[in-house]
Amino acid sequence: HFISCGFGMFAGSTIQVPNDVIKTRMQSGRSSGLVSSAMHVWRNDGIKGFYVGGPAWLMVNLPKTQIAFMLYHAMMVEYKQRVAGDRALTPAEHSVLGFLQGLVTGCVLNPIDVARARLMVQGL
């Protein structure tokens, strides 16, 4: 699962990174809209401009996704052994485990995500 997650994230990055570049620039106030932001990147940096921060995006999102799945699974197994036993977990229990997993993953990887956003805003 670890390797297939990596391949999936790499493939998804071909679409998601340009989307994040445009979104981040719009959020920072460097562009007023989707089309103008995309045109600005294209005119100033070409196709490479859409992938600025791509390696940083992968450095954040690949481990984040892999850690999230592994941590959630480990937490679920531990919870079932200690509390739930053989019964199926309720949606509320799954939600709490998912919340805790997201909290831990976000706290650990947020500094890298800040660096990624700065790269995307600055451009080439």
Image: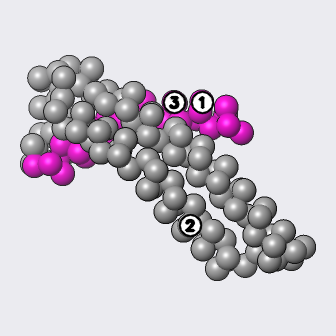
Residue at left offset 60%, top offset 73%: 95
In this picture, residue 88 sits left or right of residue 90: right
Does the stretch in magenta take in 9? Answer: yes
Q: Name the residue under label 1.
A: 7
- Where is residue 17? Give x, y as percent: 36, 35
Is 40 drawn above or below residue 48 in the view shown? below
Depth check, mark 2 against mark 1: the one in front is 2
Residue type pointed to by label 2: Leu
Q: Are marks 3 and 2 in contact (CB under 8 Å)?
A: no
Q: On the rendered image, what quadrant is the N terminus found in?
A: top right
- Which residue is denoted by mark 3 in the rendering? 10
Q: Nearer the viewer, mark 3 or mark 2?
A: 2
* Observer-nearest of 100 and 47: 100
In the rendered image, residue 29, in percent from the top left (x then y), is placed at 10, 49
Give the side of residue 20 with respect to residue 89, left or right.
left
Q: Are marks 1 and 3 in contact (CB under 8 Å)?
A: yes
Residue range in magenta is 1-29
Identity, as a three-letter code, of the amino acid under mark 3:
Phe
- Residue placed farthest to the right in the image? 86
Q: What element carries label 1?
A: helix
Three-letter amino acid code at disc 1?
Phe
Find the distance from the CA under tag 3 to the CA under tag 2. Answer: 26 Å
Per the model, the C-alpha gap separating discs 1 and 3 is 5 Å
Q: Name the residue under label 2.
A: 100
Q: What is the x, y in percent for residue 107?
A: 43, 56
Q: How crowded is mark 1: few (under 14 residues within 10 Å), some or many (20 or more)?
A: few
Q: Is the magenta stretch mostly helix, strand or loop?
A: helix
Q: Identify the element where label 3 is drawn.
A: helix
Q: Is mark 2 on a helix, strand or loop?
A: helix
Task: Sort mark 2 into few (<14), some (14-19) or many (20+) by Cα contacts within 10 Å.
Answer: some
Of pointers 2 and 1, the one earlier in the residue sequence: 1
Which of the 4 quarters of the picture holds residue 123? top left
